[in-house]
């Protein structure tokens, strides 16, 4: 009997020590704080959405407003505002470099911004319709001038002055032209005239001369050598 009772007691869980009780208490408190923070965050988002819905509604009812710029918001708040604007049937854009400095601008559908206006906001500039119109006209004028120049073809460039007039004080007027007309080839320089190359002898005279030279050469070979 004693052995049975001992085995039952040994199989039962031991009561938690003081350290375990403290750890469990801290865990319960941390879970409660986390749940409370989550509820507060949820409530803040609900209140923020209601406030944005009120501002967007006022913007729609104000006929004098075509766009509205909001203060910088964090990513979650911008997401909520974009959702409210979409439900209201408006257009919205986010601008700004740093995430903490980004802001939202909303526009009425009938006054949606142009690409040039959006580009100005992206560069941190204020949109000026008058300056934009002047810039557009200048761009159209430059494009028109380029098209006209392309149709006319390349321009012919004429020198401002004749080079002969520019250097007339050195070479004189017409000096080079006159010298070119006066230039004649020297027949005796570096070549033999054709008249000097022509053989005017007849065939018989040429043969007689060759025979005479041959006899003279043979007679010279037959002379006795002096002893």
Image (cartoon, rainbow, N blue to C red):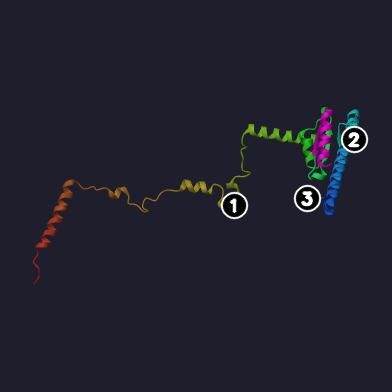
Tell us which disc is closer to us: 1 or 2. Answer: 2
Name the residue at 14% across, 59% down. 217
User: Can see residue 128?
Assistant: no
Label 2 Cα neighbours within 10 Å, binned few <14 / some 14-19 / many ≥20: few
Q: Which is more toward the observer, 194 or 156?
A: 156
Tell us which disc is closer to us: 2 or 3. Answer: 3
Q: Residue at label 2? A: 51
Residue projecting furthest to the bottom? 227
Q: Which is more toward the observer, 194 or 23?
A: 23
Residue projecting furthest to the front? 1
Question: What is the CA distance from the residue labelled 1 to the residue labelled 2?
Answer: 91 Å
Name the residue at 70% across, 34% down. 143
Marks 1/2 in contact by CB < 8 Å: the verdict is no
Element under label 2?
A: helix
**Measured from the top left, where is residue 27 in percent x and y?**
83, 48
**Measured from the top left, where is residue 186 in percent x and y?**
39, 51
Name the residue at 83% across, 53% down. 17
Q: Residue at label 1? A: 169
**Measured from the top left, where is residue 31 in percent x and y?**
84, 45
Element under label 3?
A: helix
- First to last magenta residue range: 70-94
Tell us which disc is closer to us: 3 or 1. Answer: 3
Marks 3/1 in contact by CB < 8 Å: the verdict is no
Label 1 Cα neighbours within 10 Å, binned few <14 / some 14-19 / many ≥20: few
Q: Is residue 63 magenta?
A: no
């Amino acid at each position: 009997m004693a052995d049975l009772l001992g085995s039952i007691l040994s199989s039962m869980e031991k009561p938690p020590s003081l350290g375990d009780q403290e750890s469990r208490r801290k865990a319960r408190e941390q879970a409660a704080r986390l749940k409370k923070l989550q509820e507060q965050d949820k409530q803040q988002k609900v209140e923020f959405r209601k406030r944005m819905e009120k501002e967007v509604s006022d913007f729609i009812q104000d006929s004098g407003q075509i766009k509205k710029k909001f203060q910088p918001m964090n990513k979650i708040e911008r997401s909520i505002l974009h959702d409210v604007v979409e439900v209201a049937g408006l257009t919205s854009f986010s601008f700004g470099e740093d995430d903490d400095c980004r802001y939202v601008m909303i526009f009425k559908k009938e006054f949606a911004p142009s690409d040039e206006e959006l580009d100005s906001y992206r560069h941190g500039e204020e949109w000026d319709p008058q300056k934009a119109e002047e810039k557009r006209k200048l761009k159209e004028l430059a494009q028109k001038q380029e098209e006209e120049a392309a149709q006319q073809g390349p321009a012919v460039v004429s020198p401002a002055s004749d080079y002969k007039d520019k250097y007339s004080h050195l070479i004189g007027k017409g000096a080079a032209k006159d010298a070119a007309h006066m230039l004649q080839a020297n027949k005796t320089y570096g070549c033999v005239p054709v008249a000097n190359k022509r053989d005017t002898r007849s065939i018989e005279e040429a043969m007689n001369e060759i025979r005479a030279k041959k006899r003279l050469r043979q007679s010279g070979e037959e002379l006795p050598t002096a002893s």
